[in-house]
Image (cartoon, helix red, strand yellow):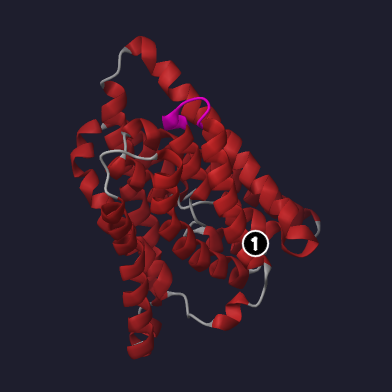
Amino acid sequence: MSFRSFYLPFTIILGILLPSFGAFSWLISPLLSLLLFLSFLQFSFSFSVFHEKKIFLVVLLNVLLGVGAGVLFSFFSRDIGITAFLVSIAPTASAAPAVIAMLGGDIAFITASLLLSTLTCTLLMPFLLFFLFQTEGISLVEMGINIGEVILLPLVLAQGIRFFFPAFVERHKKISRWSFWIWGIAVLLAMAKTSAYLWALEKNSLLSTLLAPAGLAFFLCFVHFFMGKKAGGVQYSREMSQSLGQKNTLLVTWVALHFYTPAIALGPIFYIIAHNLYNSFQIFHYERTIRKNT
């Protein structure tokens, strides 16, 4: 097996063991923008990709599940409610098209879902956070501008390059391969920041601090993949399941660390583990089925 297979666990473990790297967590924002830029650079914007109505259903479910989870889990505590909201409203992950390709699904569907959910959910996120949780000490305008910069600038820049310099894009297609390694560095920094918070806790409260976000993340992971599969019907069950279940958790981890607390970031971090475990299972099961049928 290649180092790529162990890269994610390696970055997570390294982040836990090196909490001092949390001092560089300010790099998560530019790294996230770079990741989105590389994703959008591969995407040729055209309204024709949105001909399938179920793509809009993905976005609607993302928002509804985010609001529903936020309201429901707020009965336990405000922080758990914010955690559930951020995890649930997180848009489709940048790596989702690559995973759906390995599962034999429709790449165009999930790529369109990635773009639409990223724009819609992230632009709605600041307003919904303020409406649901009346966050004090945080400016709605500041949050909106910061999130907008992370999302919109990479999109505009990438599509501008595609439009004015198409030959450059064709010559540098392989640059997208760097996304995997950049993503791992960003995960390492997020883990280090959260690890520094965990190391500062009393030992007797560590387990209880971890149990709630871990259980919440794995539960929500099941809900999103299951809801996507049911909503997708016969034709798009795999694509919608992946669109709703495989989430850009790095984005909402950054939101949690930048505007809230490392405790709230634990939910998205555990979701990274949850959806990657499920993806590994899916790929293994799909490849085994293919081998049996050949």
Badge count: 1
Instruction: Identify which residue is drawn at 18% across, 39% down.
Output: 23
Local crowd at mark 1 within 10 Å, few (<14), some, or many (≥20)? some
The one of 177 and 78 positioned closer to us in this rendering? 78
Task: Work out whether 67 lies above or below 155.
Answer: above
Name the residue type under label 1: Leu
The one of 23 and 146 positioned closer to us in this rendering? 146
Horizontal and vertical percent for residue 151?
36, 63
Residue 136, picture quadrant: top left
The stretch drawn in magenta includes residue 228: no
Instruction: Identify which residue is drawn at 22% across, 48% down.
Output: 26
Instruction: Identify which residue is drawn at 57% across, 34% down.
Output: 72
The stretch drawn in magenta includes residue 75: yes
Instruction: Identify which residue is drawn at 25% across, 21% down.
Output: 200
The one of 148 and 130 positioned closer to us in this rendering? 130
Horizontal and vertical percent for residue 184?
36, 49
Horizontal and vertical percent for residue 280?
59, 46
- Residue lying at the far top in this picture: please name it: 204
Q: Which residues are magenta?
A: 74-80
Q: Secondary structure at mark 1?
A: helix
The residue under label 1 is: 57
Q: Quadrant of the C terminus?
A: bottom right
Task: Work out whether 210 lies above or below 104.
Answer: above
Task: Work out whether 152 lies above or below 96.
Answer: below
